[in-house]
Image (spheres, rainbow, N blue to C red):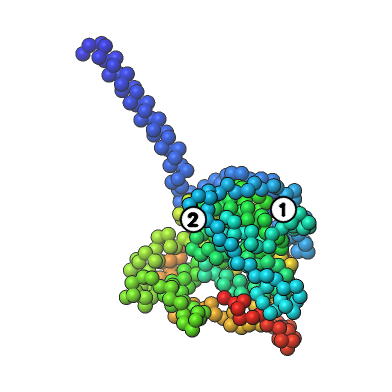
Amino acid sequence: MAPKLKKVLLGGLILVSATILTWMQLYSKITTVTNISISEPYELKRLKKSELVQQTKELIQSRLLRAESLANEGPSLKIHKANIDTGNNFIGRKAPATPIIAPKTLEQKYGSCVNYYAWNDAYPDSYKSLPLKSEEDSPAQPQDRVVFNRVGKCGSRSVIALLRHLAIVNNFSLISSVVNNMTVIHEAWQESLVYSIEQFKTPFLVQRHLYYVDFTNYGAKPPVYINIIRDPLARMVSQYYFKRFGDRKIINGTHKDRYSGPEEERNQTFDDCVLRSKWECTGLNTFYIVPFFCGQHRNCRTPSMWALNQAIENVEEDYLFVGILEELEDSLSVLERLLPSMFKGALEHYLHPLDTSAMTSTATLHKKKPSPQVEQIMKEAMWFEYQFYNYVRYKFNQTRDALGITPYKSRPSHDTWGKLKKEGLSVPDQCMW
């Protein structure tokens, strides 16, 4: 073979080898980001951490230790207005929210749905119809800006019925999103949501089914996050039967039919669903609670140590408290101590509600407990969920003990709401779910 041809072939081989090596290196960099090992812990390094995150954490720790009052807020940050596409995209359309005008006297408050506001956060300008802050307002305290990114089938509807009453007697705005089944939202929507919440007049509590949003990513001061979770398998079983049979809540004289699957599978038990490996009871459906705390990143929706660690880190840094549904009475007692301006009287009203239908209408119908065999199968499949649940229970017990709260099951019963009932105070029916 001619020397010149050999040189050409050798040069070609070198060029091809270099190209392949470059692509392999590039691919390896991509896969280390997107394909996260589920067998080893992932070292978390969050981006865009501001000093305000650490300040908020210190405020929460101070509140827990002293259990008397939250410290004053650190230096506030100016948030830039969201740059939202106002073309023909859905998020660009405008639709005003529907606020309920608050009466001026306490007597009038019990005659209308005061302090409760419906908010369609899919529309960037909808916040303008809600109570907004002004330059004359006093500086907001951390405990005056609360976000409850509630987890489905964890008792949140009962808690919201309770919050409607507390919003009246404790005089804060309860702002409820009407957007359902949109827990993941794109960045422009997140920015719009953060900007809107920054404009609300304090004190307020915003509630929505939503995966955690990091406010500091958009130059905003973080709110106080709270939430409530329950045993992961119990939650999944409750959701399974709820989709088929609903609950005791009656709309226009009938139960709302939420089931959209094959009719022949409506009466299928949860055990049958698991043992037949139906899609409802397998795969990503076993990974539900962790993403609410992990956040909006796409990897948060895949079972992994990364998602679990990120969820735990977010709870440590940005959540004032995560309650346990199985110990809801104690959870309410903790919230009364940590957020008295909003949750004062929460336990008493929950135990002795003025409108009992509001607290009993959310129990799922025809629910059957899974067999021991199925329970073992599912708990193994839901390993990440139970790791997070056990961590939250540990934190819950720590918080309750630090605040000196006696477990509710060990307390004598009290009935202090009889006096209010005798006075004829009641929450009107139109204020209930």
Q: Nearer the viewer, residue 36 or 374?
A: 36
Q: Secondary structure at mark 2?
A: helix
Residue drawn at the location 65% of the way across and 62% of the way down: 130
- In the picture, residue 230 is in which quadrant? bottom right
In the image, residue 243 sits, relative to residue 387, either above or below, namely below
Q: Is residue 405 visible?
A: no
**Number of residues whose C-alpha sits closer than 10 Å to that of mark 2, classed few (under 14), some (14–19) or many (20 or more):** few
Q: Nearer the viewer, mark 2 or mark 1?
A: 2
- Location of residue 143 in the rendering, given as x and y in whole percent from the top left corner: 72, 61
Instruction: Please tell me which residue lies in front, 404 or 254.
Output: 254
Check residue 58 in the rendering and tell me which mark sits there, or answer none: 1
| Quadrant in the picture for residue 133 | bottom right
Residue beneath the point at 21% across and 13% down: 1
Residue annotated with mark 2? 90
> In the visual, does 418 lie left or right of 212?
right
- Residue farthest to the top, as pictured: 3
Q: Position of residue 178 (x, y in %)?
A: 55, 65
